[in-house]
Image: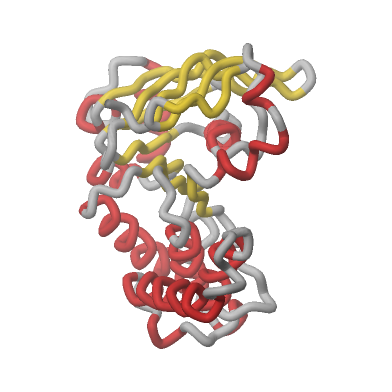
Amino acid sequence: MAILDVSHISKAFGNTEVLRDISFSLDPGQALAIIGSSGSGKTTLLRCLNFLETPDQGRIAVRDEVLFDAGDPATRRESEIRKKRLHFGLVFQSFHLFPQYTALQNVMLASQLLAQERPDFRAHKKDILADIEAAARELLHQMGLSDRADHYPHQLSGGQQQRVAIARALALAPDILCFDEPTSALDPELTGEVLRVIRGLAEKHTTMVIVTHEMAFARDVADQVIFMDGGVIMEQGPPEAVIGHPREERTRQFLSRYAQN
């Protein structure tokens, strides 16, 4: 059973079609890499999955639960958006950590806010918050940042900030973890440490959708690759096919230019 099923998603901004008839599915534990030139619709697709944008057409389902159906007004209610987002964790290009909070506080924040809505929160506040802190510290440990828990973002390198952002995205145990060019804001020497973390998540069979410009990484880590161009999926399949032996001329052109750069 697919954990994620995306069917016929389309999105336009004014007269500009950004996504056209996007469909794919993802099984539990798989990593999907989305590649393509700037402006091909990759980030907009991620934003639609995370309900930061509302598709004009199509359907999104997670574990057979329909989260969005353009033909069903009930799935478009603003009151349901936050609950739908809990299925997805999103790691942005530029970290987006809260500068006034430490690394630990950044990881804990969303869980603390959700916990306050629990009916037993007031009665068991101390224990609940202790559990949240313990879980956050464990995530920082997994990211190799135990000794940076009390550091503020400005005291961390770019790679460390991105690893805090990954821990924050994992804190709510999302069904699917999404990355939007997770290394694009990093210096080359810091890129490797973030890619190692994502590789480790893939080895643990974390379900992921990764928009990336790191072709070798996509080839080595992804179970599936989608190449997008002009808002459409030009080619999709296993990495050895799409990256190693692309069928479409447009895919070959993209990969050839990329290799030259």
Q: In this view, does 24 lie to the left or right of 224?
A: right
Q: Is residue 132 left or right of residue 255?
A: right
The quarter holding residue 249 reads: top left
The quarter holding residue 243 reads: top left
The image shows residue 113, relative to residue 30, as above or below, that is below
Whole-percent x, y for residue 178 in the image: 46, 45
Q: Nearer the viewer, residue 196 or 172?
A: 172
Residue occupying the point 55% across, 53% down: 92
Q: Which of 211 and 129 is in front in this view?
A: 129
Image coloring type = secondary structure
Whole-percent x, y for residue 184 in the image: 51, 54
The quarter holding residue 26 reads: top left
Question: Which quadrant of the rendered structure holds the N terminus?
Answer: top left
Residue occupying the point 55% across, 19% down: 9
Question: Which quadrant of the rendered structure holds the C terminus?
Answer: top left
Q: Nearer the viewer, residue 205 or 155?
A: 205
Residue occupying the point 63% across, 12% down: 71
Whole-percent x, y for residue 211 in the image: 45, 41
Residue occupying the point 42% across, 35% down: 34
Q: Which of 224 and 234 is in front in this view?
A: 224
Whole-percent x, y for residue 255 in the image: 37, 32
Q: Is residue 261 visible?
A: no
